[in-house]
């Protein structure tokens, strides 16, 4: 079982609705998630965003719990660099790197985006291969898409598509905005809006079942909980700590 699969699903949170000011997002934050499998803690994920001049640096790390390390150690790291936009414009991806270390499975890939030419150059650093693909003007990588969605208005009952490039292909994902709901987490109770990314039939995410994500129903739209069904049980990720918080329910 790939413990990092659920956190990777943040990558598909993309809805191209009416943008709210990108300044609503705190570009210096650290969010910590407990990952559980069938109710037992299986690992930890940390999502960090740092503003550096005209760029945003996003880093996601996922590590398995000690009891899992003995038979299936997970130590994953993904990073993204985004050139910040002006006004209400979020910005464009510049660089993406993904290192996967899960049991015996290894992967190390990177992509460099050229929005002016609508091209992306990707390299597999383990297989020593490279490729150049076309992208659209609304393309993001699997980490920058997470921040992008947090700058948007989510309208219940409305679904749209956004392009994501994952070092292998450019693909579209529909995200349904389902409902509003209050949820309890280790750091408090929050009003949220629930979204459901619709999986494609091919690719990495085909291994996952139904996915639902709970975002705070405010200008910050912090992901506070995620769940997905797997062949045996369910994986969940719940916000457990960090240095920046959405508004709690009184």
Image (cartoon, helix red, strand yellow):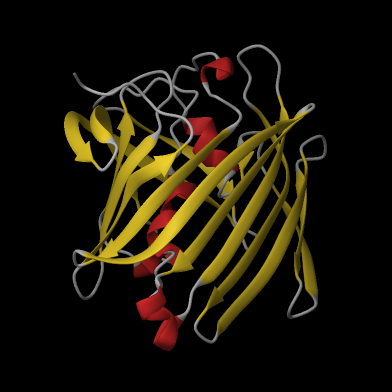
Work out whether residue 203 can be spotted: no
| Residue at image location 28% in from the left, 62% down from the top | 36
42 to the left or right of 106: left
User: Which residue is at a point 79% across and 27% down the rendered structure image?
Assistant: 53
Using the rendered image of the protein, determine whether residue 67 is visible from the camera's viewpoint: yes
- State the residue in front, 195 or 45: 45
Residue at 24% in and 29% down = 190
Q: Quadrant of the N terminus?
A: bottom left
Q: Position of residue 26 (x, y in %)?
A: 55, 24
**Quadrant of the rendering where the C terminus is positioned:** top left
Residue at x-position 25% and y-position 33%: 188
Q: Is residue 90 above or below residue 106?
A: above
Percent x, y of residue 13? 43, 41
Foreground pick, 32 / 163: 32
Q: Is residue 150 left or right of residue 54?
A: left
On screen, residue 93 above or below 234: above
Say left or right for 248 vs 250: right
**Left or right of residue 223, residue 167 in this image:** right
Give the x, y percent position of residue 50.
Answer: 66, 35
């Amino acid at each position: 079982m790939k413990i990092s699969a659920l956190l990777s699903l943040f990558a598909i949170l993309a809805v191209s609705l009416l943008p709210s000011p990108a300044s609503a997002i705190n570009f210096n934050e650290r969010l910590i998630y407990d990952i559980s499998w069938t109710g037992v803690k299986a690992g930890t994920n940390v999502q960090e965003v740092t503003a550096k001049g005209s760029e945003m640096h996003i880093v996601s790390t996922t590590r398995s719990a000690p009891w899992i390390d003995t038979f299936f150690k997970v130590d994953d790291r993904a990073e993204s660099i985004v050139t910040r936009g002006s006004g209400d414009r979020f910005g464009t991806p510049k660089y993406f790197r993904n290192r996967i270390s899960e049991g015996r499975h290894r992967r190390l890939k990177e992509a460099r985006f050229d929005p002016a030419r609508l091209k992306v150059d990707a390299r597999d650093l383990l297989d020593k291969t490279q490729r150049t693909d076309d992208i659209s003007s609304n393309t993001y990588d699997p980490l920058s898409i997470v921040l992008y969605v947090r700058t948007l208005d989510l309208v219940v009952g409305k679904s749209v598509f956004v392009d994501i490039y994952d070092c292998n292909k450019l693909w579209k994902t529909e995200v349904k905005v389902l409902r509003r709901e209050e949820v309890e987490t280790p750091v408090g109770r929050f009003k949220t809006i629930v979204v459901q990314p619709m999986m494609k039939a091919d690719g990495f995410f085909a291994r996952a079942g139904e996915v639902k994500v709970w975002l705070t129903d405010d200008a910050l739209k912090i992901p506070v909980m995620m769940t997905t069904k797997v062949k045996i049980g369910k994986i969940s990720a719940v916000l457990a700590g960090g240095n920046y918080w959405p508004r709690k329910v009184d």
